[in-house]
Each structure stands twice: as structure tokens, then as C-alpha cells.
Amino acid sequence: MLNSPQIRQQGSTMPFGNTHNQMKMKYTSEQEYPDLSKHNNHMAKILTPAMYERLRSKQTPSGFTLDDVIQTGVDNPGHPFIMTVGCVAGDEETYEVFKELLDPVIEDRHGGYKPSDKHKTDLNPSNLKGGDDLDSNYVLSSRVRTGRSVRGFCLPPHCSRGERRAVEKLSIEALASLSGDLKGKYYALKNMTEAEQQQLIDDHFLFDKPVSPLLLASGMGRDWPDARGIWHNDNKTFLVWVNEEDHLRVISMQKGGNMKEVFDRFCTGLTKIETLFKERSHAFMWNEHLGYVLTCPSNLGTGLRAGVHVKLPNMSKHAKFEEVLKKLRLQKRGTGGVDTAAVGGVFDISNADRLGFSEVELVQMVVDGVKLLVEMEKKLEKGQSIDDIMPAQK
Amino acid sequence: MASSFTRLISGRNTAALLASLGAGTMATGFLMSETGPLAADKKTKLYPPSSDFPDLRKHNNCMAAALTPAIYAKLRDKVTPNNWTLDQSIQTGVDNPGHPFIKTVGCVAGDEESYEVFAELFDPVIKDRHNGYDPRTMKHPTDLDSSKITNAVFDENYVLSSRVRTGRSIRGLSLPPACSRAERREVERVVVTALAGLKGDLAGRYYGLGDMTEKEQQQLIDDHFLFDKPVSPLLTCAFMARDWPDARGIWHNNEKTFLIWVNEEDHTRVISMEKGGNMKRVFERFCRGLKQVEHLIQERGWEFMWNEHLGYILTCPSNLGTGLRAGVHVRLPKLSQDPRFSKILDNLRLQKRGTGGVDTAATGDTFDISNNDRLGKSEVELVQLLVDGVNHLIECEKKLEKGQDIKVPAPITQFRK
């Protein structure tokens, strides 16, 4: 029974992902198949024993396996507020090697997006109509975020410390070249001073080690806080997170309702960053089918979430609130983010879609939709009905 | 600037040379094409061990004290026969810097062979944790003959309960940090099949964590038997909570004095316990039960992981040897107030915990007192040590009650001089 302790030289075996996979092949797929009987996430809905059998022997060139893809969905049967995805990518090739699982997950998650569909990228801010006049009596702040992955490196669930540090180093170099109103500074998580840390907390910029089991189960919390950091411009309106849930998270934000300005800065900044990376021989992961490639399948395409914090105390109590949001292709969250509930009638309202619509189209939906919601709120304040301004399904 | 320097030099060979000189991150920008995937085997060249070496400057655990860049470089690309790596062994220690006052171990084994393949790390960790025990030269004695124990029935005015626990691993199957779902289920199958063969006062029943009824769950909680999904980052960062609660469960005999946890932190944790002070009987049942379980698995061609240097092989290096923690819940209202209490425990090779276990503080005057050591002394030696120590503590308590003074006993000898 004892496996003889041979010491074998092996090609690099990244933490968490696996030449271990070959060893598992001595068990049948039935013996290895996860128990998903109590699960409610996209992966659990799609995966079948037959599919598992076909995919379990595969791995991406960097060694990411099916079990790596689905671990987070196995460990987390469900979430109280949202239908979780239940699978992650460890590298760009995951989406190709495991397309038999991920294509239907993507289709399910992204409103019927087919494997043959093409995704449009549009980061030209002048294509946005309006958006500079959302009522600041209601709209407290505006924000646009997305993510970017650097081609040639494994993603946060799978990367080694060396790769993560290389991504950080590249990011610091690129961001250091930004100028004008985008000029800023990088704060590495592991050596910021107490004063710097407090300032970042006060600015609502600091991200901390993930506590969500959704993220931890996928391996994204490894080696914290090594090679993680926050960069922001001096004006505190443009912010980049390095090596949190994705290689880069890029955020443009400001108080008030001028979404146009936020989106303008967002596009300008992103485009500049992309250019700076390209000058250093690195592209972002992108293809014409999936758009920008990110760790979680839910963020494919644009990876874009444009949102506002908006006061809707009356509207949120209206029986048709959910229906209106659905028609406008918007979603609500608490002001603490995805895992929180709303406080004091203030909601985070953002686009529900990520893939199959361009950046401009999604921000347009938010701008138009929030305008309508505020109009409705004002009517309800005056005791008027909102039936005549109910929107059609977008 | 590094990037312009690498642009000046053309050719893959130069970049590979730069990488091997430790300029791994400079070379990455150069070697990587915009479209090419990065194959696992190319990574060894692109990322020299120095680029992957963890930042342990804020760390205080046995792994961080023992791991050097040289050891890491030597071991990073090795795998055990089950394809477990050094990075996986140390992940928990990298992710949990430790505590200024408590020195955690910071590394785990993924299989039996980890202790050999990564001996250059595990040996100094074992030495550090187990009082200078050297696995290369020393042999660990195993002795489960409970008849040798003397004076092991305590005064029940002081001792409220007695307990002995250990762990056992099934040879040939990966340990909880590394096991696949199929392996874990195999451990469950092997153990549960064997336990079904126990008879008499050891006859009992298995409760799978995933399919127990609400009523069964409540009963197990009331009996203080139920274990839950680990929340300690020390364990979760070592990949032990994967696929929870698949193939985890609790077995106990009908009398509720012999209990086995399946697939928690180890393949099995074996516990003998009862109210009162009859440690002799607790240990007798412990030894008998263990031997019977071992016999039952051997009948089916399985055995426990064991060797003459490390004794019984368990997931955490801190539990090697006997894996044994023998302890009592004991009332020591006067002694616990005495400033010499800690020193007395130290010299007797005992530790105190709260009655909730390792991460709790004592409430009131009742303490969990158990043996410190696991490796280098046999089960009989450690239980006798605990017995003699507890008897001594009770004597001290009685003296203090009568207003007499007590003496701090001389320290018991260790390997380290």
C-alpha cells in the first residue's frame, strides 16, 4: 500500500493546480464526482457526471484542472442574495479547455449568450448621450469599475508568488507613467504605514483580505498580502486594485451625479494603461467572443459595473420596484457592495449585464435608468402614480 | 531601465540566461509572446525559486524559522509520489504569520512521503517543535500496553473528566490537505467498515455529517461530540475544508465513551473519554479500541501510517509520534491563583487550556490539563507523566487548602540539553 517515496523532478507544479490530476485518474469519475445535491449555483446546474468524465483528464498548459475550476462551487452551495457562478478560471486557456462546462455557464449567466456570439468593445466616451445631469439631491455618488487581466500570467486562483509579483511590478511601472490628472501613487498592502492605511480606509479605497468563502475557496487569498496593492491618482478619482480578485480592477468614481465625467476619465485612463502595458510587450487578455477575460465568468465581456448610490426611499418600497429594475436591466445592492443590504433607503443601482453589450451601451442603460428611477421617486414623493412612466423591457 | 536593457539584447538564449541569473521578472516581459500560453514546464526557467520565495519577514512559526532560500530552491520543484509540493505544504504557514506569543507549526504533510521528500524542511521543524528530537538519528517508542499505568484513578473531588485522544492515518491514501474526493471517501469507507466490526462495549454507530437528521445533530452537540467545518485559517489555508461535508462523519460507541472523527484534520481522530477520574479505564479502552480497529483494517489489507523514526504519521508535524493528548478537566481554585502555577506545569511537562479546547481560556477555576509532548516518548510514558503530574497538582491544591506551602518540582528531562 505504501507509495515508494521517489523523488521525481517535475515541470513546475503551481500551488493548487495539479499534476495531482493524473493521480486522480486511477479512481473512476463516479468515485470523484462531487455531491451537488444541496447546491444552487450555475456550475451545479450545468455539470453532469458524463461531462465530468469527459473533462476530468484535461488541464490547461499551466496545469489548471476541472476540479480547480469547480472547487469554489463545490465548497459553497449557495448565497442568500445572489445566484453564484460556482467556477473560476485559473488562466486564459481555462475558457477554451473547459468550454463544455463554461459555455453553458456563460449562456446561463449572461442572458443566453451563445458560443458563436461576438462581443463588442466600445470605450469611446463621446458615444455616451447625457449622463452629466443626474440629480445630486438623489444621486450621491457615481462609479464605474472593470477588471483587466495581463496576458501570459495565471489568474489569482492559480498564480504562483513569482507571477503575482511580476504582475505587480508591471502594473507599478505602467501606472507610474500616468500624468496630468491621472498622476498618482502606489501603496503596497504589505508595507503601507498606519497613516496611509487609515487614509485609504477613510477614502473607502482600501481593500482587505477577502473573507468571502466564495473567493477563499478558489485560492485567491493565498500569500496575502504579498504583491497586492492600491494605486490612486492624487485627485482620488481614479483607482486601481492590483492582485485582488483579478490582476487589475480599475475604478473611476466621484461624489455626485456626473456619470459622464466618471465614464470619460474611466475610458481615458483605461486606454492609457493599456497602451503603457503594450509598450512593455504585454496585452490584456481579450478575444472577440468573450471580450475581456477575467477570473470569474460573471465578469466576462466588459467586466463593467457602472453604478450610483441613490436615495430611493419611496421607490424601493413600491410593489413594482423589482419589476422596474428588471425592465431597465439594472440590479440593486446595499451600499456596502454585493454582500450587503441597503441602509436608509440608499441603494447601489448598477447594470446587471456584463457580456453582449458594449461599455457605452451599459453605461447608457445606467444613466437612462437612474434618471427614470429618480423621476419615479419624485412622483411618489408628491403622491403621484408612476404607472404612466413604466418602462418597456430593454 | 530593465525593460530597455532587455529590448537591446535579442534572442531567447539571453533571456533564459537572465532568468537563470535570477532576473526572472525582467525576462518575463521579453520571453512572453502576446498570444502564447505559458506552459507549466516553461515556468521553471522563467520563474527561478528566488522569484517565488515567500516573504516571511513578519512571520513567527516553525516553518518560517526553518525555511531558507537555499532549502526552498532545492525543494520547490520536487513532488511526492502523490504529486504534493513544497508550496502546498507551506501555504498555511505563509498565509498565517502567527502570533507573537504562540508559535504555530506553519506546514502540513499531504501524504506520508512528504516527511521524506521535504525532509530538509520537516526535520528542523520537527526538532524545533519536539524539543530537539532528530528524526535522522532517533527512534520513537510505541507502547500501547495500558496495564503498565499506575495510580491513574484520580480524586473526583478535583477531577471532573478524563480523556485521551490521538490520530491515525490510513497508509496509501493522501492526507486531508491533499486528498481527492475519491480518496477521502475511500478513507471513510475503510474506517467505517472496520468500526462496524467492533463488539461489546465498543459496539457503536456512524453518523455521516452530510446526512444526519436534525435530531441526531442536536444529540451529538449535546454530547459535545459534533465537530463542525473548520473556521480556523490555520486549517482552511491548508486546504483541509475542501468539499465539506463530503465523507466526514462521527462514529461513537453506544456507551458514548469511545469516539472517532473521520476526515476532519486527520484521516481519523480517536477519542476515549468519560466523566470522573478513572484515567486507567479511559486509557485501557483507548488502547484496546485502537488495537481492535488496527486489526480490523489489517484483515482487509490496510494499515496505519507508521515508521520507527516518526511513529504514527499525521497531517500536522506537531502530532507526530504518539499524536497523543491525555488530559483531565480539573478544579484547582487555589493552585491556579498561585504565581508558581505556570512554572509547576512547565516542569511537569504539562499544559493548560480552557475547557473549550486549544483556543479557549479557562473559566472559573477548572482547567484542561494535558501533556505537552507527543514525540520521543511512548504512549504509556506520556500518560504516566500526565497521571503523575495531575496527582502532584492535586497534592499541591490540598496542601494549599490546609495552608501548607508547596514546592516547585524539578523539571523532567528532555532531549535538548
Image: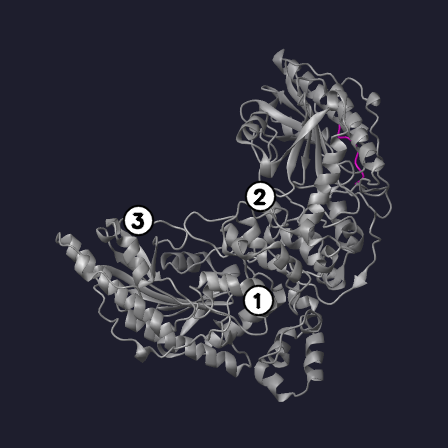
Q: Residues within 10 Å of mark 2 (few under 14, many from 20)?
A: few
Chain at tag 2: B
Q: Is residue A296 visible?
A: no
Q: Position of residue B20 (x, y in %)?
A: 71, 75
Q: Is residue B56 magenta?
A: no
Q: Main secondary structure of the magenta part?
A: loop
Asked where in the image residue B255 lies, by quadrant, the reply is: top right
Residue that lies at the very extreme toward the top in this rendered image: B402
Q: Which residues are magenta?
A: B410-416
Q: Earlier in the sequence, mark 3 or mark 1?
A: 1
User: Disc 2 or disc 3, which is closer to the eye?
Assistant: 3
Instruction: Tell me the CA gap for discs 3 and 1.
Output: 40 Å
| Marked residue chain, label 3 | A
Q: Residue furthest front?
A: A50
Q: Looking at the figure, which quarter contains the C terminus of chain A? A: bottom left
Residue at the spot of label 1: A99
Amino acid tagged 2: Ser
> Residue A212: percent from the left, percent from the top?
49, 51
Q: Say above or below: B321 vs A109.
A: above
Disc 3 is placed on an element classified as: loop
Foreground residue, B19 or A336? A336
Quarter residue A266 falls in: bottom left
